[in-house]
Image (cartoon, rainbow, N blue to C red):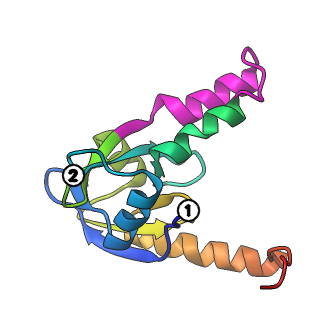
Amino acid sequence: MSQFLGTHQNRLDAKGRVSVPASFRAALRATAPADDAGRSSLILRPSHKHPCIEAWPAPVFAALERQMQEIDLFSEAHDDLAASLYADAFPLEADKEGRVLLPEPLVAHAGLSDSVVFMGMGRIFQIWEPAAAERRRAEARERARARGLTLPAGPSA
C-alpha cells in the first residue's frame, strides 16, 4: 500500500477546487484505482479532533465498517462514533487533473481561504489552513518528544 507522505501547499480557487499534490495522487491511485474516466474515489470528512479536513481513499474508509461492527449497534458509543464518521462525510472523485471540489461545510470547518496545506498521514491525508498546519506539526513534534514516543523495534532487514 502506498502512503501519503510530506507536506504540500496549494491554492484553493474561487470555486472551491484544489489540486491534490502529484505524490498524493499517485498514492491514491495505488490505494483506490481510478475508474474508466481516470477518477479516484475519496471520502472527505471533518476531523473530529482537529480543525482540518481528513481525506480517506474509499477502500481505507470502507475498512472502518469492519471495526464499527465490533461496537454494539444500539450503543451510545456506536451512535456517537457513526455520527462522527459518517454523517458529515462527502464521497467525491478527483478529476483527471487531480482536482477536488471541497464542500463548503468542510471549508468552513477547516477555516480555509485561498491557500491550503496537504499533510500526509500515512493511510490518509489532511487538508489544513497553512498557519494551523504549522502549529499542528510543531505541537505534534513537541508532544512526541516530551512523551518519548517511538515505534517498537521490528525485525531487522
* Picture layout, residue 74 above or below residue 141: above
Q: Quadrant of the N terminus?
A: bottom right
Query: In the rendered structure, does residue 155 fall within the stretch colored magenta?
Result: no
Rendered position, 128 above or below 89: below
Q: Distance between the residues labelled 2 and 1?
A: 22 Å
Residue 143 lies left or right of residue 44; in this view the side is right
Q: Nearer the viewer, residue 54 or 94?
A: 94
Return the residue nearer the eye: 35 or 132.
35
Residue interval drawn in magenta: 69-91
Kindly identify the amino acid type of the residue bearing the numbered disc 2: Asp
Q: Which mark is residue 1?
A: 1
Q: Position of residue 121 (x, y in %)?
A: 55, 65
Pinpoint residue 111: horizontal percent, then vertical percent: 37, 55
Decide if residue 154 is on the left or right side of residue 96: right
The image quadrant that residue 82 belongs to is: top right
Badge 2 element: loop
Q: What element carries label 1?
A: loop
Give the image location of residue 78, x and y in percent.
70, 25
Which residue is identified by label 2?
A: 95
* Closer to us: 85 or 5: 5
Label 2 or label 1, whichever comes before in sequence order: 1
Q: Where is residue 119 in the image (x, y as percent from the top left)?
A: 47, 68
Q: Which residue is drawn at 42% across and 45% down?
A: 44
